[in-house]
């Protein structure tokens, strides 16, 4: 069983009410091989919501209290991101997932690149808050591209 970002499954849960569907990921949901979550909704955010980015580091730094998550207008929302990450971890453990596939660049879901905190579209290497917490708990996290490449090499993989 996989856990996947809801927006990759086609749900309109992004900050601006859009999705970023990957057909293969939706197929896995239909086949009951994956379950979707949106850490930001689990943290208590509505749709739509203000965009937010990590200031001063990445998701691991947020968990360690060295960085903060800030909305574009300046409101600090660090706690809600951490709540969402904890809820996502709980779900991953309940389902005993083999891996988690999360949307790259997001301050929650990014797993190798995230927006750089300047709200300019620039990116830096690092994890989102949920990815960081999952990785710290020994759970395999992949981006959508990483997962699709992985799957291409293992079409018969037992998910
Ligand atoms: Fe998608 Fe993750 Fe952002 Fe939710 S928090 S909209 S699942 S990238």
Image (cartoon, rainbow, N blue to C red):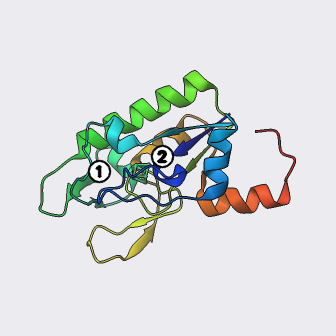
What is the CA distance from the residue labelled 1 to the residue labelled 2?
28 Å
Q: Is residue 142 left or right of residue 8?
A: right
- Residue placed under numbered mark 2 in the picture: 6
For ligand 1, tell me if the residue under mark 2 lies within 8 Å: yes
Q: Is residue 117 left or right of residue 29?
A: left
> Tag 2's secondary structure?
helix
Taking the spot 68% from the left edge, 56% from the top edge, the residue there is 147
In the displayed structure, would residue 72 be above or below residue 47?
below
Taking the spot 67% from the left edge, 54% from the top edge, the residue there is 24
Taking the spot 55% from the left edge, 31% from the top edge, the residue there is 92
In the displayed structure, would residue 29 be above or below residue 8?
above
Place of residue 101 in the rendered image (x, y in percent of width and height, measured from the top left): 59, 49
Q: Residues within 10 Å of mark 1 (few under 14, many from 20)?
A: few
Taking the spot 60% from the left edge, 25% from the top edge, the residue there is 95
Sequence-wise first label, 1 or 2: 2
Q: Residues within 10 Å of mark 2 (few under 14, many from 20)?
A: many
For ligand 1, tell me if the residue under mark 1 lies within 8 Å: no
- Residue placed under numbered mark 1 in the picture: 66
Quadrant (top left, top right, bottom left, bottom right) of the C terminus: top right
Question: Nearer the viewer's eye, disc 1 or disc 2?
Answer: 2
């Amino acid at each position: 069983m996989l856990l996947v970002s809801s927006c990759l499954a086609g749900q309109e849960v992004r900050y601006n009410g859009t999705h970023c569907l990957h057909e293969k990921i939706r197929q896995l949901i239909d086949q009951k091989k994956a379950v979707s979550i949106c850490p930001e909704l689990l943290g208590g955010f509505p749709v739509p919501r203000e965009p937010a980015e990590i200031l001063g580091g990445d998701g691991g730094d947020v968990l360690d209290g060295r960085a903060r998550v800030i909305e574009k207008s300046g409101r600090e929302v660090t706690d809600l991101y951490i709540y969402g990450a904890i809820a996502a971890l709980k779900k991953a453990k309940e389902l005993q997932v083999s891996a988690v596939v999360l949307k790259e660049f997001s301050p929650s879901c990014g797993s190798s690149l995230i927006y750089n905190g300047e709200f300019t579209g620039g990116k830096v290497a690092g994890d989102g808050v949920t990815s960081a917490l999952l990785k710290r708990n020994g759970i395999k996290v992949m981006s959508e591209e990483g997962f699709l490449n992985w799957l291409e090499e293992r079409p018969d993989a037992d998910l």
